[in-house]
Image (spheres, rainbow, N blue to C red):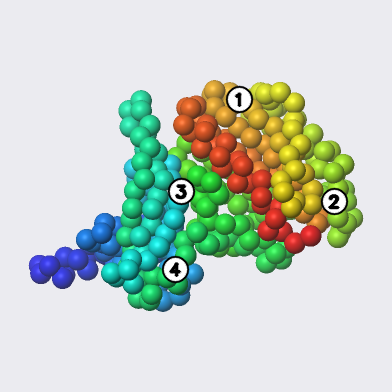
Amino acid sequence: MSQTETAIRESINLADRIRKDFGFEVSVIGGSGSRTNPWYIIEPDSERAALHTLQLLTVFSSLQNALWRVDKAHPLDEAPDQLRVVVERIRFQDESAIAERVPYFVQFDMPAAQVNPLAVLGCVQPEVGLALPYQLGWLHYQGATESMPLDVSGTGYAAPYGAPGIDATVFLYRSSSALADTKLDVDDIANEFAAADKVLQIHSGSVGLGEEQTVHPELARLPWKVRHYTTAEGGTAFLMLTAAGDHFIKVRLTARPGARTAECARASYEEFLHLADVVPR
């Protein structure tokens, strides 16, 4: 088999494995992400090419059991069709956590300056105008589609986010008691949070640490209600709830035991506080 035939076969195997194991349809033709052998993404649309870049990083970081987030990305002066993506990464090896910064290289069929991985959306729900970023702190969108799926109750939407050892779900739903198109207020948030807090502690065995907090991010119209928990397994959890228009936004985040995992969970939690900014009032 010639070198060209081998490269084609490896590319097909890579894309097929990503599709089967992760559900991503990534238009990648070989490469390893290194400077001398960049991943080659043949997607002609710049936004889709950026999404495929993040999906590749998701795949390879998952295989390495690593927490990761994109720090910055810029085209190479000497190769304008290549993008250098710098990733902050924490790998768990035996009992240790190894923090590092790793550059990856990606080639496109367009100027790399048109591809911006940090602007990629994970999923959208046009009905309410919600657009969630692919990356939230150390967490990344886990859905295979870009449409926000209905949650199990059928009354709202649920978007899964995750990383090795950390899981989170963003719920978007209308109040069961408020009239349609009625804007929710701080009292609605407090009542809904109290009910969600009770359900979480009863059904998951999580124990609340301290009292609930009210957090009011800059520029946000309404505050978040937040509480920190210890899970039954000794890990960390957060429950967060706010409102935008006539919808509640609720986030449940759970992290396995471990200082670095808890640290990354808290950093991600702070990113979730700005979710209400992307929902129309």
Q: CA distance from mark 4 to mark 3?
A: 17 Å
Please state the horizontal and vertical placement of residue 128, each as a whole percent of the image: 73, 63
Secondary structure found at label 2: loop
Q: Answer whether labels 1 and 3 touch (C-beta < 8 Å).
A: no
Q: Nearer the viewer, mark 4 or mark 1?
A: 4
Give the residue type that dot 4 points to.
Val
Give the residue type that dot 2 points to.
Leu
Secondary structure found at label 1: strand
Q: Nearer the viewer, mark 4 or mark 2?
A: 4
Q: Answer whether labels 2 and 3 touch (C-beta < 8 Å).
A: no
**Mark 1 or mark 2: whose residue is earlier in sequence:** 2
Q: Which residue is mark 4?
A: 115
Q: Is residue 184 above or below residue 37?
A: above
Please state the horizontal and vertical placement of residue 225, each as a whole percent of the image: 75, 38
Q: Which residue is mark 3?
A: 69
Q: Is residue 130 above or below residue 257?
A: below
Please state the horizontal and vertical placement of residue 86, each as a whole percent of the image: 38, 53
The numbered mark at residue 255 is none
Q: CA distance from mark 4 to mark 1?
A: 40 Å
